[in-house]
Amino acid sequence: MDIAAALKAFVRTVERGSVTAAARDLSVSQPAVTKHLRNLERHVGARLLERSSRMVRPTVQGKALYEASRSALATIDAALEGVRHEMGAIEGPLRVHAPSCIGVRHLHPIALAFQERYPDVTIDLVLENRAVDLVHEGFDLALRYGRPEGQELIVRRLGLVRRILVAAPVFIERSGPVETPARLSEVDVVTTPTLLSPRDLLPLRRGTESVDVPVRPIMRTNAAETIVATLLSGRAAGPVQQLLVSDELATGRLVRILPDYEVKPTEAFWTFPSVRFMRPVVRAFTDFAIPALRAVEGVDAGDMRSGVA
């Protein structure tokens, strides 16, 4: 029995809660993972996993083996990859999670550029608007909006993601100029539900001044690309992450309205599971991606002191 392969299959199964997911992460067949698990249980003489139709969970003995094995395996992998790194090789799998808004427009091309430099790196880039458990879902790192809480993570602050008010020229021609917050209350708006209060108040800031503006949303959506498409159609004005519309602003397809005002920005963080030794490929991607993301128009680097959650 290959004890290292069996332990890797076991640890991955515990973290993913599924033999199928573990097999996918390890790029092996499901029967191969099942065989590793069966051989490992036979080797230690104990049942390590409880299986149901929906979930695979460790037994008491399985939990003890998992806690003893996961850090050791990560350290061994990091040591092996560290030797390859010293020989000039950055390689291996990299699993990254990010919100779809910044991911599609900015992190994806950064990942492609990283692979051009390091062609032996395989990247799983998962873009979706939800919080993930980095350890149990098998991510090496994640880009998050808002400081993570409730998990043992290493956190590096990326910066503030700015939100500005924009509209298409055709919208302004039809609806007239929007030069005051009161005027914003009179026009159609598209926005995300999270920005509005239950009474459809949009919080705006101008320097140290804050004002809640009642607005008339014709559409609320959590899809950033849908907001941008609605703005470009000229159907509505609204707040949007500046990093999503920098090209459209440069070409004049969208223009800023109320340029002295902005919606409260969101803090963005780069996060890593603290239970893992940071592999060279993770460190290399971090060093490559963070400066590129901080250079994106609409990301305000500000105070870059990093913290630990």
Image (tube, rainbow, N blue to C red):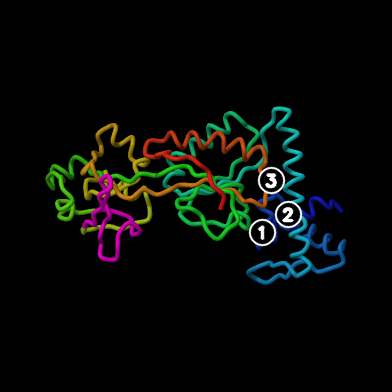
Categorize mark 3 by other alpha carbons within 10 Å: few (<14), some (14-19), many (20+): some
Task: Report which quarter residue 78 is drawn in.
Answer: top right
Checking the image for residue 78, the label placed there is none
Report the front residue among 127 and 53. Answer: 127
Q: The disc labelled 1 sits on which kind of residue?
A: Glu
Categorize mark 1 by other alpha carbons within 10 Å: few (<14), some (14-19), many (20+): many
- The answer to whether the residue labelled 1 contacts the one labelled 2, judged by CB atoms less than 8 Å apart, is yes
Give the mark nearer the N terminus: 3 vs 2: 2
Q: Is residue 209 magenta?
A: yes
- Mark-to-mark CA distance, 1 and 2: 10 Å
Q: The disc labelled 3 sits on which kind of residue?
A: Phe
Magenta residues?
Answer: 190-213
Would residue 1 appear left or right of 48 to someone viewing this image?
Answer: right
Residue 172 percent coordinates (x, y): 16, 43
Residue 306 percent coordinates (x, y): 53, 43
> Is disc 2 placed on a helix, strand or loop?
helix
Q: Residue at x 13, y 42 (%)?
A: 173
Would residue 65 appear left or right of 270 to someone viewing this image?
Answer: right
Categorize mark 2 by other alpha carbons within 10 Å: few (<14), some (14-19), many (20+): some
Residue 262 percent coordinates (x, y): 28, 46
Checking the image for residue 70, the label placed there is 2
> Is disc 3 placed on a helix, strand or loop?
loop
The residue pinned by badge 3 equals: 277
Give the mark nearer the N terminus: 3 vs 1: 1
Q: Residue at x 62, y 40 (%)?
A: 282
User: Closer to the camera: disc 1 or disc 2?
Assistant: 2
User: Closer to the camera: disc 3 or disc 2?
Assistant: 3
Task: Report which quarter residue 171 is drawn in.
Answer: top left
The residue pinned by badge 1 equals: 15
User: Closer to the camera: disc 3 or disc 1?
Assistant: 3
Q: Residue at x 30, y 36 (%)?
A: 248
